[in-house]
Amino acid sequence: MNEVTRTIALCSKNSAPGIYQITPSMLQSLHHNAIAHVTFLLDRIFFSGFFPVPWKIALITPLQETLEDPSLPLSYRPITLLSALSKILENMNYRLMWLPDTNEILSHSQFGCRRKRSAQMALADLDAQIYEAPCSPSFSTWRTHSHEYVPFAYPKSSTN
């Protein structure tokens, strides 16, 4: 419960409420009994590995860039407004990621939900593997039904 209370306290009071209109200041004003129920809910989500589908629903709204012409569509950028509980769960997840990162529990090919490991990094890693594949001793080819040779690289037999 202390982790949830601390994460709720760290939320910006100016943060957007999302689709359910629950603001962080509303959560910060909850009685400790209600926080215990929120903690139980978040624990169930963590241990089940199931993220509630309604919490994935976000409001996307255009935000005007400063000093840009408001009549031009390019003067706006989209922002996503998630529910406050979804943001709290995400913050708790980031705070707890030090354990698998420091103990190297997760594979190096795991990019999702990790700091400094974006989708662009995953694509760059894939690109590097494809580029290096023909030089690899485990690289091979096989024939397709059209009798063309298709390159294939065997996966490395390591834990990473």
Image (cartoon, rainbow, N blue to C red):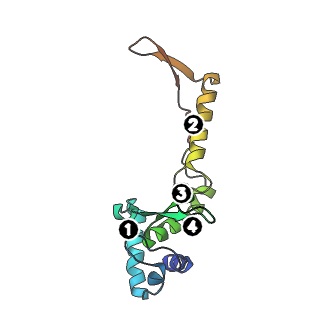
- Say what amino acid the circle numbered 4 marks: Arg
Badge 4 marks a residue whose secondary structure is: helix
Badge 2 marks a residue whose secondary structure is: helix
- Say what amino acid the circle numbered 2 marks: Leu
Image coordinates for residue 94, horizontal then vertical, percent: 55, 64
**Mark 2 in CB contact with mark 3 (< 8 angstroms):** no
Query: Which of the 4 quarters of the picture holds residue 69?
Result: bottom right
Q: CA distance from mark 1 to mark 4?
A: 17 Å
Q: Earlier in the sequence, mark 2 or mark 1?
A: 1
Please tell me whether mark 2 or mark 4 is closer to you in this view: 2
Badge 3 marks a residue whose secondary structure is: loop
Q: CA distance from mark 3 to mark 4?
A: 40 Å
Residue closer to the observer: 133 or 44: 133
Q: CA distance from mark 2 to mark 3?
A: 37 Å
Tell me if I can see residue 96 in this picture: yes
Which residue does the image show at 50% across and 78% down from the upper left?
Answer: 8
Q: CA distance from mark 2 to mark 1?
A: 34 Å
Q: Residue under label 1, please give it.
A: 44
Determine crowd level at label 1: few under 14, some 14-19, many 20+ residues with C-alpha closer than 10 A. Answer: few
Asked if 34 appears above or below 47 in the picture, the reply is below
Asked if 139 appears above or below 76 in the picture, the reply is above
**Mark 2 in CB contact with mark 1 (< 8 angstroms):** no
Which residue does the image show at 52% across and 60% down from the upper left?
Answer: 71
Query: Which of the 4 quarters of the picture holds residue 96?
Result: bottom right
- Tag count: 4
Please tell me whether mark 3 or mark 1 is closer to you in this view: 3
Query: Which of the 4 quarters of the picture holds residue 109?
Result: top right
Badge 1 marks a residue whose secondary structure is: helix
Asked if 129 appears above or below 59 in the picture, the reply is above
